[in-house]
Amino acid sequence: MKIRSIADYLSAHPFFADLDAGSLAELAGCAVNEHIRAGEYLFREGHPAEHFYLVTRGRIALELFSPATGPHVLDSAGEGEVLDWPWLIPPHRWFFDGRAVEPTSVVSLDAACLRGKCEADPRLGFELAIRAAQTMSHRLQATRARLLDMYAAP
Amino acid sequence: MTAAGATRPRPSGPPLLPRPFRVLATRPETADTTTLTIEPADGVPLAFAAGQFTMLGTFGGAEAPISVTSSPAAGPVEQTIRDMGGVTHDLTTAAPGHMLTVRGPYGTGWDITDGVGGDLVFVAGGIGLAPLRSALLEALANRAAYRRVVLLYGARTPAEQVFRDDLARWAAGEGDVALAVTVDRADRGWAGPVGLVTSLIPGAGFDPASTLALVCGPEVMMRFVAMALIDAGVPAGRIRISLERNMKCGIGLCGHCQLRELFICTDGPVLGYDRLAGLMTVREL
């Protein structure tokens, strides 16, 4: 059985698609694999966002807890998706809970390490910032569309 | 655009003459949506193509355009109706044995045979799964003719999914359907994706160059889906959309359903996105 390296996971993930091998090798130095069980939290609201996660298996639900109505699932990220952008954008804090709804594997990239690589190599930094912005853009557009509550009775 | 010159079933008698149909069974789909199984009281089967609609009504009452949701190849006729007002309330509450009026079938169909040999991608939102289900059942009756058959379905909440029995069978592997369902809102009882249906497209694993995509749901959702499919590499001419308008006559005479040069009841309801893209964002059309 071939053992996949962290660089293999990064190169196979859509977020890092077509990134050159040198950059991937640099980023792999910031990354580890993590596996969490269903029901466990990957991160919690208000906590420092110390990692950037690539979901490689399973699903993480983004939840917000209301004392009056309990937890609400607002969004989710599955295989091929990422969580999220607080690693890049100050104040580097999670605004939601991230809970695994099934056994989930992620590649976890240390946020400070990642930002350090970006500062050391502005070309790489710009590329990652663009990709993070694309993720934000897609999520924002989808969230705006969902605000219409399209499937409700008119 | 749908297949040029495709021949489709037409009303068996005078096109404006309603035929009596009897309700055989009713199946609640959600709190406000019901599927009726109906049979012709005159014994003449209703021939239809997947994607076509009928004007379904009550005796002495009004009519509403309702897509046929059952397979065109076999089985009884099924139509799924959402209780939105007077007419649809009467239809959704019709009990077995109740007599209804049916005109049609009318309009264009999905013409899925244009996708033979390639991937078929169905993208549905809310009750938009109803007209697509007919085409999906048609595809599954001839499953070997297609490579990947993908159904991407978005619903408001888990409780507001229609055809849950079908979804459960397809999720279990029946028909070799690659199924992904997302909802806009969920509680912890839902372990699937939460988000807009477009978020399912990147992971759907279809070959865009050989894909025929069929889309039905709220019009805003269809615009977003069409753009996402194009971004994924599906040509606009291989994306088909089912439009809903205020149909009255069903035969292109009254003009109620006019969309600039198109009569949706006869030129549609299924139209190619290459033909619709410039019209769907024009206000007041």
Image (cartoon, rainbow, N blue to C red):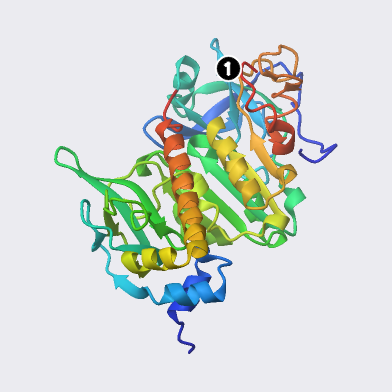
Residue at image position (74%, 33%) is B275
**In this view, B125 is above or below A23:** above
Q: Which residue is mark 1?
A: B63
Q: Specify whether residue B48 is in view.
A: no
In this view of the protein, which residue sits in the foreground, B145 or B61?
B145
Q: Position of residue B3 (x, y in %)?
A: 80, 41
Residue B215 visible to an observer of this rendering: yes
Q: Quadrant of the N terminus of chain B?
A: top right
- On screen, residue B44 above or below B192: above
Q: Nearer the viewer, residue A117 or B29?
A: A117
Q: Residue B254, image x and y in percent?
A: 71, 11
In the image, residue B34 sits, relative to residue B193, either above or below, namely above
Question: Viewed as shown, does residue B183 lie left or right of B98?
Answer: left
Furthest residue to the left? Answer: A67
Specify the subunit that label 1 lies on. Answer: B
The single residue placed furthest to the bottom in the displayed view is: A1
Tell me the quarter of the image containing the C terminus of chain B.
Answer: top right
Whole-percent x, y for residue A106 in the image: 37, 68
- Name the quadrant containing residue B141: bottom right
**Figure label count:** 1
Q: Secondary structure at mark 1?
A: strand
Residue plotted at (64% across, 30% down): B53
Q: Position of residue A74 (x, y in %)?
A: 33, 45
> What residue occupies the far right of the structure in this picture?
B5
**Mark 1 burial class by Cα count in 10 Å: few <14, some 14-19, many 20+:** many
In the figure, is residue A131 to the left or right of B120? left
Query: Looking at the image, which is closer to me, B118 or B195?
Result: B195
Image quadrant in which you'd find residue B283: top right
Task: Check disc 1 and give the amino acid type.
Answer: Glu
